[in-house]
Amino acid sequence: MKTPLFFWGRLVLGLIFIFAAFEKILNPADFAGLVFNYQILPDRLINFTAVFLPWMEVLLGVLLVFGLWIPGAVILVNLLLLIFLSALMFNAARGLDIQCGCFSTGGAMTSHVTLSILRDVGLMVLALYLFYNIFLSETS
Amino acid sequence: MRCKGNKWLAGLLQAAGILFISALLSLIVNGLRPDRLPILADGTSKFRLATDPGKNLMVSLDEAKKHYFDRSAVFLDARSPEDYEQGHIKGAFNLPQENMEEKFSEVMENIPPERSIVVYCDGENCRSGSDLAVFLLEFGFTHVKVLVNGWSVWQENHLPVERNLRDIS
């Protein structure tokens, strides 16, 4: 069922994804440094991830905003947010104080791991709502 | 319920399509831009902080603190002299990239190669810090660690700093 909430949900989530990718596309090398700092991926995958991830975010954002390929986009958005959230929590748990790199690749901002995690949880709730609406709701 | 299976199948196919298009798009754009990243390289050398496999150059704040209060490591500030002047970890030496050549011997001459060194800069990427660490390792210093986002986390944890008040106007 395409409720107004569904419409606004995908619009907001889509715009956030586009916004989040912007700086990363402009500064791939900086973003690669951020990906490296997470200390999760093997070295070989870092550059590819840094190049690929922002474009995936942009594409997902555009599809969400324009309402195209919504089931596929929603699956990937959920998957991606789950990965981001796990990575953040994993590093918070092992006490690695790094920058989120979620929205910016800039220099001097301080890191607030808890805030980043909460923000991701918020986005995740929105994404899960879309997922539920498409795949699980009885009326879908 | 009728087309639930189709919806899942469509979703998965679309997801695969999205992944494919993103990969294609990102590789094409990366190939076209002058500052492209080497996709298959082992990270770029700038980010490859592990000297031996599995040996990680990052140091946690707790470890750095221990080093600091035990006085078991030299702290090096890789930021610009201006930033250093405004405030730095108490006792840290400044070794900025821009005048590395003149400062290097001045700072490093009394530091034996096996002495523990903690390098820091500020901000999320901390490239100058890791660059300096890699440089020092190549130079023969054996115990070099990077405190990522060091200046920020040091201040956030209210650890000893030195500030030059005359510069704050």
Image: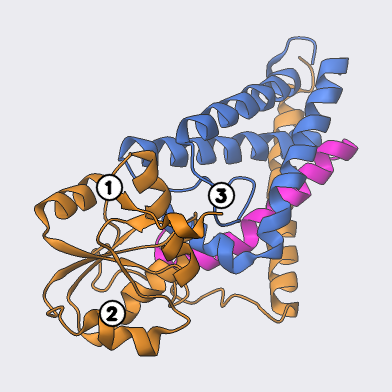
Q: Are marks 2 and 1 on the same chain?
A: yes
Q: How far across and how far down the image is residue A35, in percent?
A: 49, 57
- Colour blue belongs to chain: A
- Magenta range is A41-69
Query: Would residue B51 be counted in the magenta stretch?
Result: no
Colouring scheme, one of rainbow, by chain, secondary structure, one colour: by chain
Q: Residue at x 69, y 70 (%)?
A: B27
Q: Which residue is mark 1?
A: B160
Q: Please name whichever residue, B117 or B159, is drawn nearer the observer in this view of the structure.
A: B159
Query: Predominant secondary structure in magenta?
Result: helix
Q: Which residue is mark 2?
A: B136
Q: Is residue B63 above or below residue A8?
A: below
Q: Which residue is mark 3?
A: A101
Chain where mark 2 sits: B
Q: CA distance from mark 3 to mark 1?
A: 28 Å
What amino acid is at disc 2?
Leu
Element marked by disc 1: loop
* Residue B53 found in image quarter: bottom left
* Residue B142 found in image quarter: bottom left
Chain where mark 3 sits: A
The answer to whether marks 2 and 1 mark residues whose Cβ atoms lie closer than 8 Å is no
